[in-house]
Amino acid sequence: MLLPHGVTQVDLAPHWRGRDRFVILDSAWGAGERLRAVLAAWRADEQRPRRLHYIAIADPALPGFRRIPQQDSNVTLDLLHAPIEQALAQLDARADAIVLHELEGAGVAFVRPLAKLAAPGTVLFSEGLDGEQEEALAKAGFASSANGPSIFASRKPFAPRPSPAERRAIVVGAGVAGSAACERLCARGWQVTLVERHAQPAMEASGNLAGIFMPLLSRDDNIPTRLTRAAYLFALDYWNNLGGIGQAIDGGQCGVMQLARDPAHARVQREIAQQWRYPAEFAQWLEAAEAGAMLGSPAPDGAWLFRQGGWARPGSVCAAMLAACGDRLAAVFNAGSTRIERRDGQWRVLDAAGGVIAQAPVLVLANGTSATSVSEASQLPLAKVRGQVSHLAAGTLPALPFVLCREAYLTSAPGAVQCAGATYDLNDPDPQVRQSSHDENLAKVRSLLGMEDAARGAPLRGRTGFRCVAPDRLPLVGALADARPTGRAERLRDLPRHPGLYGLLGYASRGLIWAPLAAELLAAQLEGEPLPLERALAEALDPARFMLGRARKHDIVAPTPSRDAADE
């Protein structure tokens, strides 16, 4: 096939035939025309690989990596919004084919990280490179050919990423974390058994009437901000592929307005808006007059408007994800009290009588703080944080065209109910709905609306759930480390892992949007595929991170979570 925009003749078919998956790295995304050409050739080839991964450097709209879910679950698309050398240095992938073009003036700094992504036999197609770039590529191990592409022929040590011998897994927990794990694994051809102690999905932390989805902003674009941005954008596309918010999924993509707390906070938000210049559909800063006009009440310090944000009922998200699994999923509900053991290379879930409920080489713990009842996960530093939501009958408070939040949130009405909350109660195991928590929620809502007497005396209902929170308030995604004392352990790769044991835990108050991308990350790790996040972000989520520098002491620190202003 001839790739558009004059790129050299590229016939990938001889290189991808006979492979289970094929990874293409493109140095310039353009308008996606090269991906369309590749997809046309892939679909027309009866000997094509099962999975196709397309990775491209793109002009920055929003910084960072973005995985864009495709209708065909056998295709992944990653757009890397960063300078090429920076993007390649953070990319965790093994490229089978590389297309280099539009690199005039790019120098040669990209060559070294590029070579680290290649394996013996990787093919390189190039056009428009200068002599210095061609020389650097040759020195890095790309042997040129007069009649075809360059071939990477370095003698560096190379460890291939094998596909799993058998694609069978058990997922424990049917909230948003476990349901997303089931869907992402089933989409890759895995047979999954879901084990849930309750009678149906989303009975615990995922059981609220409404969860809020919105990005997180910061001046330094820190790890939580970058993770939440990537997860939020992935979730919007992912939910659309499942049928859409307001259609297959109960909820509304009505937008979210986040009020500034005070003048000092507003000054910081203006600086963020000026520094990052986000596209308006992603995040728009509104001064007091414009925010107040939209809200219908004073917003004296201004607000952020997230036009693509909104709310969704987590239970309906779980149902949509599990329905998408089809016959590759076997769900076991009402499992009750269970015990987990490993025997003969297999993980087994046993019922109270010792009977085997499920058995597989891979076990994914997606059951919040209950995961620590498994001996191999018992020292994970996870805290249980109480959160009570108040339910108000529609008409009790002014109707809102969007979700409103600051220290708390108030939804537009899901059905005939507005949801307000949620409390954030440390070291409080009380599962009951109580008046003091209602009072706390309503006090914050009155402050949001600037209405001192709103909802006084109104009948209240609500729901209490418990968040699973890690000390750094980031999720735990990936292989669980062996917590026994070891020798020196200053790098994640130095830590031994329990074979076949993985976690999707610690989602705190952002599980609704973290769950899809976290499950995608885990599935990519299990399959040896390109990761959907920058290397630094993936490492920040590694469950073993709490053991670095402490393995010799065997010292696991108890969590001390704190709440941010836009937590729900």
Image: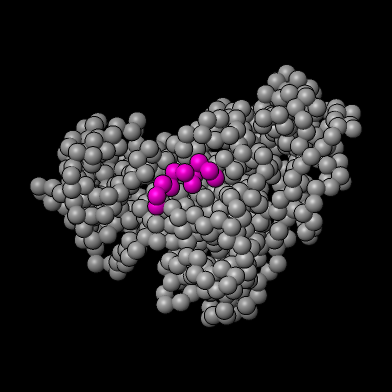
The colour scheme of the drawn protein is one colour
Residue 479 horizontal side relative to residue 425, left or right = left
Taking 330 as reference, is 392 above or below it? Answer: above
Residue 329 horizontal side relative to residue 287, left or right = left
Magenta segment, prevailing SS (helix, strand or loop): helix
Residue 239 horizontal side relative to residue 108, left or right = right
Q: Position of residue 42 (x, y in %)?
A: 23, 41
Q: Which quarter of the picture shows residue 454?
A: top right
Q: Residue at x 77, y 54 (%)?
A: 431
Q: Which quarter of the picture shows residue 31?
A: top left
In the rendered image, which quarter contains the C terminus? top right
Q: Position of residue 387 (x, y in %)?
A: 74, 49
Residue 324 horizontal side relative to residue 17, left or right = right
- The answer to whether any part of residue 105 appears in the image is no
- Direction left: furthest residue: 147
- Give the magenta-colored segment's residue range: 318-328
In the depicted view, which residue is nearer to us: 129 or 329?
329
In the depicted view, which residue is nearer to us: 91 or 362?
362
Residue 8 located within the stretch drawn in magenta:
no
In the depicted view, which residue is nearer to us: 27 or 400?
400
Taking 348 as reference, is 66 above or below it? Answer: above
Q: Residue at x 18, y 44 (%)?
A: 46
